[in-house]
Amino acid sequence: ACHGPNGNSSHPQYPVIARQNARYIYLQLKDFKEARRHDPQMDPMAAPLSRDDMLALADYFSKQKQAPAGFKADPAKVAAGRKKSDEVLCPMCHLGEFAGQNEIPRVAGQHYQYVKKQLSDFKARRRTNDAGNMTADAGTLSDDDIENLAQYIANLL
């Protein structure tokens, strides 16, 4: 209901999981189940899942086609976000065009509001299920940096 039947959430509060890396989806479900990550909607959804359920969900959603989110980005903020991305070496982990790899998520074309919230949560240490990598990186970002990065990332697909 939240992510849509094909993983293309229509509500910016819920992430697009279509075309997400299967390993990342599995690890996030496992983190919700094992209380390393928290969300009022996801915690009870993940609790009853078996390992096989999580692997099957990860496989299914990773194979779905990602649809454009329809976000209208500010070109100046996109340019500033691209510059900041290169400055803090985002593509080093998320790869070019933010396609992600293994346990590093694909964030290209993700909902603007969701990206902004996750970066803010990493910065404030409200989200810490990342072995410290994003927490450390986001800790160096200003609110303007977070805004610009969210605009840039949401603009990609």
Image (tube, grey):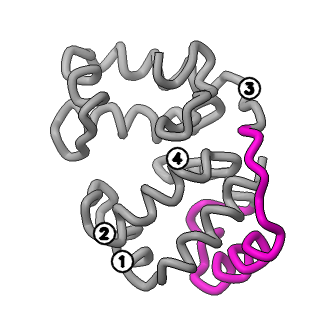
Task: Tell me which residue sits at (78%, 47%) in the image.
Answer: 157
> Mark 2: which amino acid?
Gly
Q: Earlier in the sequence, mark 2 or mark 4?
A: 4
Residue 13: x percent and y percent? Answer: 47, 39
Task: Tell me which residue sits at (47%, 23%) in the image.
Answer: 2
Q: What secondary structure is marked by label 3?
A: loop
Label disc, if present, on residue 65 of the rendered structure: 3
Disc 1 versus disc 2: distance between alpha carbons?
Answer: 6 Å
Which residue in the structure is indicated by mark 2? 132
Task: Tell me which residue sits at (61%, 62%) in the image.
Answer: 150
Depth-wise, is mark 2 or mark 4 nearer the camera?
2
Q: What secondary structure is marked by label 2?
A: loop
**Magenta part of the protein: which range?**
69-96
Q: Earlier in the sequence, mark 2 or mark 3?
A: 3
- Left/right placement of residue 154 relative to residue 7 reads right
Q: Earlier in the sequence, mark 4 or mark 3?
A: 3
Residue 6: x percent and y percent? Answer: 62, 17
Q: Is residue 4 above or below residue 150?
A: above
Instruction: Sort mark 4 into few (<14), some (14-19) or many (20+) by Cα contacts within 10 Å.
Output: some
- Left/right placement of residue 52 relative to residue 105 reads left
Which residue in the structure is indicated by mark 1? 136
* In contact (CB < 8 Å): disc 1 and disc 2: yes
Magenta stretch: includes residue 80: yes
Residue 137 location, quadrant: bottom left
- Left/right placement of residue 149 relative to residue 141 reads right
Disc 2 versus disc 3: distance between alpha carbons?
Answer: 30 Å
> Mark 4: which amino acid?
Asn
Q: Is residue 150 above or below residue 102?
A: below
Residue 124 location, quadrant: bottom left
